[in-house]
């Protein structure tokens, strides 16, 4: 029996995110929801086309919450006697731009090449979400060895941005997502670069040309956690399914902007159906 494999496979972490929100009247609120770079990328991406997810989680995570989305979960592994990674964020400013973050990262759950189901290796597009660069490099090299025509995108975080091994990773991939502050990565060898400008939008760099994609700047920001991962996942899944890069990035910026209107990513389906043309969404 032939099994249809999604055109895009997303590899990264699953976690629980706990945010402490401070309000202008002096009160605060603590809320917990699903997080992790692969979840923030795959959930909104799945609103358009089916996507495959590769990640590890502890036995304490409720996988059923992800079955509501168009995500192939055969690559999501629950490990017995393991506790899912936790991230704790204290959001202090009105625009939620300034935060303090603390992680309880379970290194036993780090995603590796061996976690990829063999049938996924025939997919043409992969997105390697933020994780230690040595792990990214191993996955990328082995993907390219198994399929020389594979198209790979990746991202990183401030903790790793200035490392030489991160620059080496970005030289290996086809599509690099780069925060504007990560100057050491701006001249990497990736053929396509998405320069993320924060709340104002992105720049698409390809073939020596720059295309600016603007975002609507919101006043009512609730939580910007995972907005970059959201953008990356939507962009990758749209180009994997035939969109031009410019149109895909325009849509990805729109979805990422929408994602910061609420806490967590699991409510993205209802927000998208209210605010977008439903004919464009996967049913």
Image (tube, rainbow, N blue to C red):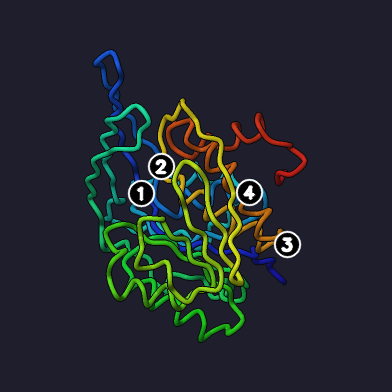
Q: Nearer the viewer, mark 4 or mark 3?
A: 4
Mark 2 neighbour density, 10 Å: few (under 14) some (14–19) many (20 or more): many
Choose the circle earlier in sequence order: 3 or 1. Answer: 1
Whether residue 1 can be seen here: no
Between the C-alphas of marks 2 and 4, the distance is: 26 Å
Choose the circle earlier in sequence order: 3 or 2. Answer: 2
Look at the numbered discs 3 and 1 and tell me whether their residues touch, using CB distance below 8 Å. no
Who's the residue at 33% across and 53% down the image?
A: 58
- Residue assigned mark 3: 242
Who's the residue at 39% across and 50% down the image?
A: 36
The residue furthest top is 25
**230 versus 193 height, above or below:** above
Looking at the rendered structure, the secondary structure element under dot 3 is loop
- Residue assigned mark 1: 15
Q: Report x, y in % for residue 8.
A: 60, 63
- Residue assigned mark 2: 34
Choose the circle earlier in sequence order: 2 or 4. Answer: 2
């Amino acid at each position: 029996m032939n099994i249809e494999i999604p055109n895009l496979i997303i590899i990264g972490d699953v976690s629980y995110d706990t945010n402490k929100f401070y309000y202008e009247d002096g009160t605060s609120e603590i809320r917990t929801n699903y997080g992790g770079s692969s979840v923030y990328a795959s959930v909104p991406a799945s609103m358009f086309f089916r996507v495959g997810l590769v990640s590890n989680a502890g036995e304490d995570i409720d996988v059923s919450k992800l079955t509501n989305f168009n995500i192939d979960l055969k690559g999501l592994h629950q490990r017995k006697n393991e506790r899912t990674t936790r991230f704790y964020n204290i959001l202090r400013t009105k625009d939620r731009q300034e935060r303090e973050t603390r992680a309880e990262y379970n290194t036993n759950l780090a995603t590796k090449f061996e976690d990829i189901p063999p049938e996924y290796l025939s997919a043409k597009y992969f997105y390697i979400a933020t994780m230690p660069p040595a792990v990214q490099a191993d996955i990328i090299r082995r993907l390219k060895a198994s399929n020389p025509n594979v198209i790979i995108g990746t991202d990183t975080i401030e903790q790793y941005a200035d490392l030489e091994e991160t620059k080496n990773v970005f030289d290996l991939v086809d599509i690099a997502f780069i925060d504007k502050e990560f100057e050491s990565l701006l001249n990497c060898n990736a053929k396509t670069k998405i320069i993320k400008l924060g709340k104002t939008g992105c720049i698409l760099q390809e073939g020596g040309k720059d295309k600016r994609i603007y975002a609507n700047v919101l006043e009512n920001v609730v939580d910007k956690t995972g907005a970059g991962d959201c953008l990356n996942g939507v962009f990758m899944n749209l180009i994997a399914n035939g969109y031009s890069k410019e149109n895909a990035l325009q849509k990805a910026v729109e979805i990422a902007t929408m994602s910061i209107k609420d806490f967590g990513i699991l409510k993205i389906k209802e927000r998208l159906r209210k605010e977008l043309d439903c004919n464009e969404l996967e049913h």
